[in-house]
Amino acid sequence: MPMNIEDYRYITAITDTGGFTAAANVLFVSQPSLSQRVKHIERVYGITIFNRDSKKITLTQEGECFVRHARMLLTCEENMRKEILDMRGVDDWPLRVGIPQLIHTHFFGQLLHHIHEHGSGLQLEIIEGSSSQLQQMLSTGVIDVTFCFLPINYPTLAYKFIYEDRFVLIPAAGSSLEEKIQQAEIQPGGYVDSKLLEGEVFAAGMPGTRSSNFLESVMKEHNIDIHITHRCKNFSALYKIAMSGNASAILNESIVKENQEVTSYYQLKDTSNDTLSAVVAWRKDVYQRKAIKELLQFVQEIQ
């Protein structure tokens, strides 16, 4: 099989993600297919690209040379293709936009409404993932632009600030935590001493998500024990669990505000890393097609 441009993308994705499985997930291909393609590339060039004798995939000296030139080839091909289409006034393929789940409820609906109001011909292909996953996908060219939260982990990415969010506490309806807050006469939106969370039952996001990490950091900072009895991928489900009285939750303030139900939520006293800075990011080193420029303009208009 001859080489094609995607082969270079495969190798750079493995390099950026640190492994075949992670790269396969980012590229939406199967891991066995990716491994076979890498073997083919190595046969074509007569080289070994990756050291495979350790848990973490690393580049050989030949591999470092290959990746350096592969990145240049990918950038040149992408820039050429996009600039030619813009010169022809042709931009009829979807703009691949990454969206973390936490941005849907607060911001993205407003953006879509604004695009529709202006009669824009923008075609969007929405791809969901965590902020870190979407940054990986953007850096490897799988998507064109992404909404995500700081920090930005790749020096090749530029970004523009959109809004600041924060984590807030939703006590389970009818729970002992809600009772303790009421006894302390803390008004909705006020600050709750994190010590009040001791021994309480919580629902949390999946391990590794920002809300889960924040909850764990609160436990560590204040030396308290919290019982996490539910784990959810969907943050709307966390909200529903708290509303039903099954468990308290930590959620983005924007999610609570956008929910149709009315509920009381609170801030946690003396906690760090409780704010989230939402941004829109794009690649610095590629030609910015008209669709990307138009999307960034719409983002600026609704801020």
Image (tube, rainbow, N blue to C red):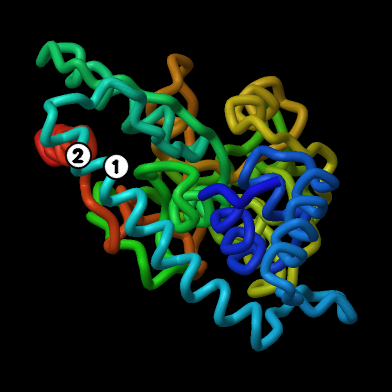
Residue 194 visible somewhere in the drawing: yes
Q: Is residue 269 above or below residue 47?
A: above
Q: Are marks 2 and 1 in contact (CB under 8 Å)?
A: yes
Secondary structure under badge 1? helix
Residue toward you, 213 or 264? 213
User: Who is closer to the viewer here, 179 or 96?
Assistant: 96
Label 1 packing within 10 angstroms: few (<14), some (14-19), many (20+): few
Residue under label 2, please give it. Answer: 84
Which kind of residue does numbered mark 1 sit on? Arg
Residue at the spot of label 1: 81
Real-space Cα separation, disc 2 to disc 1, in angstroms? 5 Å
Looking at the image, which residue is at 21% across and 40% down?
Answer: 289
- In the figure, is residue 52 to the left or right of 139? right
Identify the image quadrant of residue 87.
top left
Q: Which amino acid lies under the numbered mark 2 shown in the image of this protein? A: Ile
Vertical placement of 303 versus 273: above or below?
above
Which residue sits at x=51%, y=51%? Answer: 131
Could you classify mark 2 by the number of other residues whose Cα lies within 10 Å: few (under 14), some (14-19), or many (20 or more)? few
Viewed as shown, does residue 143 lie left or right of 197? left
